[in-house]
Image: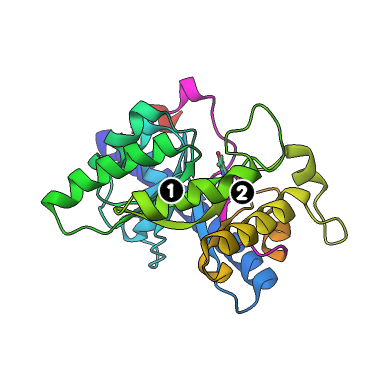
């Protein structure tokens, strides 16, 4: 009896892993078809999805699938990221892409050595707190600088985080000059949902154009080559349109992992009893 149920749940896990590998492969193929030879980083956005889903893509040998070894995963909630980072291999490269609270920046940068970047920096105070956290971590180990993206509110919606496009250069300058343990990786935007749904080959997305123009202005103001600054833009609905506007990194969640559960129902560790239902 115990054996049967164990096998049953393993089988479900294998099927799930196979599905995930298929989904991400198909997204990767669409990225490549749009970008050609230009390298694009694909961040698999795993928020509210169980750790086993991440492991299936990062280390599929656990599900007896040929190696896929996906590295970059995005999370939106601080506590969830902390828990997942403790459970999962240190080889995962985590991206924090959610809304940042100033008082949570320091522990985030300090407690997760394999936090690869924070994409949602929109004030100098948040940058300063991340700087302090990473400085503490680096004092004890030879880790890399923490990469950060300046999040820009390109759509002007009040509900969206991000600094104004006109503020991006000052914030970028602050990071470069005042935060020696941070590395300015580029700019990030989410954009308006309506625009993202309307994005097509004939109808380029204004948010992506605004982010690219903002990046060009920032580069000019701080006196660096604009190609050095990345553009993190594009999600499930609109990543191909974003790549056409110059995105270097897309963040794709539901097309890989399926629809997300409401936050209150999300589970980091899946209960096998539940899985079998
Ligand atoms: C959730 C989220 C994504 C992924 O969204 P999908 O539409 O599921 O692909 C990307 N970026 C940010 C900032 C997000 O919060």
Q: CA distance from mark 1 to mark 2?
A: 36 Å
Q: Nearer the viewer, mark 1 or mark 2?
A: 1
| Front position in the image: 68 or 12 | 68
On screen, residue 215 versus residue 59, left or right, reads: right
Residues shaded magenta: 245-269
| Front position in the image: 11 or 57 | 57
Q: Work out whether mark 1 precedes mark 2 in sequence or the reverse, and give the earlier one.
A: 1
Question: Height in image: 255 above or below 183?
Answer: above
Residue tagged by mark 2? 255
Q: Which residue is at the far left?
A: 140
- Measured as percent of width and height from the top left, residue 120 is found at 49, 42
Which picture quadrant has residue 22? bottom right
The response on whether ligand 1 sits within 8 Å of label 2 is: yes
The secondary structure type at the circle numbered 2 is: helix
Image-quarter location of ligand 1: top right
Quick check: can you spot residue 257? yes
The secondary structure type at the circle numbered 1 is: helix
Question: Height in image: 273 above or below 89?
Answer: above
Residue tagged by mark 1? 174
The crowding category of the residue bearing disc 2, from other C-alpha atoms within 10 Å (few below 14, some 14 to 19, many at least 20), is some
- Measured as percent of width and height from the top left, residue 81 is found at 36, 37
| Front position in the image: 31 or 144 | 144
Which picture quadrant has residue 156? top right
Q: Is residue 142 magenta-colored?
A: no
Question: Height in image: 52 above or below 34?
Answer: above
Q: Which residue is at the far right?
A: 202
Quick check: can you spot residue 14? no
- Measured as percent of width and height from the top left, residue 37 is found at 60, 79
Q: Which residue is at the far top?
A: 264
Number of marks in the rendered image: 2
């Amino acid at each position: 009896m115990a054996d049967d149920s164990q096998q049953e749940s393993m089988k479900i896990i294998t099927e799930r892993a196979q599905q995930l590998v298929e989904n991400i492969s198909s997204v990767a193929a669409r990225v490549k078809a749009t970008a050609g030879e230009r390298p694009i980083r694909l961040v698999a956005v795993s928020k509210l999805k169980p750790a086993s889903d991440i492991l299936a893509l990062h280390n599929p040998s656990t599900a007896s699938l040929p190696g896929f070894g996906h590295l970059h995963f995005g999370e939106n909630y601080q506590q969830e990221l902390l828990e997942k980072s403790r459970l999962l291999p240190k080889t995962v490269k985590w991206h924090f892409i959610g809304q940042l609270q100033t008082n949570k920046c320091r522990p985030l940068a300090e407690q997760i050595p394999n936090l690869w970047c924070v994409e949602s920096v929109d004030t100098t105070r948040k940058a300063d707190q991340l700087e302090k956290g990473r400085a503490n971590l680096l004092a004890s180990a030879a880790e890399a600088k923490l990469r950060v993206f300046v999040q820009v509110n390109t759509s002007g919606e009040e509900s969206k985080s991000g600094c104004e496009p006109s503020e991006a250069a000052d914030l970028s300058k602050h990071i470069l000059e005042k935060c020696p343990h941070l590395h300015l990786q580029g700019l990030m935007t989410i954009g308006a949902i309506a625009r993202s749904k309307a994005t097509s080959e004939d109808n380029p997305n204004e948010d992506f154009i605004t982010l690219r123009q903002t990046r060009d202005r920032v580069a000019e103001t701080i006196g660096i080559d604009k190609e050095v600054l990345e553009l993190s833009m594009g999600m499930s609905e609109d990543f191909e349109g974003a790549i056409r506007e110059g995105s270097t990194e897309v963040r794709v969640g539901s097309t890989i992992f399926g629809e997300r559960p409401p936050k209150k129902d999300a589970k980091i560790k899946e209960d096998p009893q539940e899985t079998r239902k």
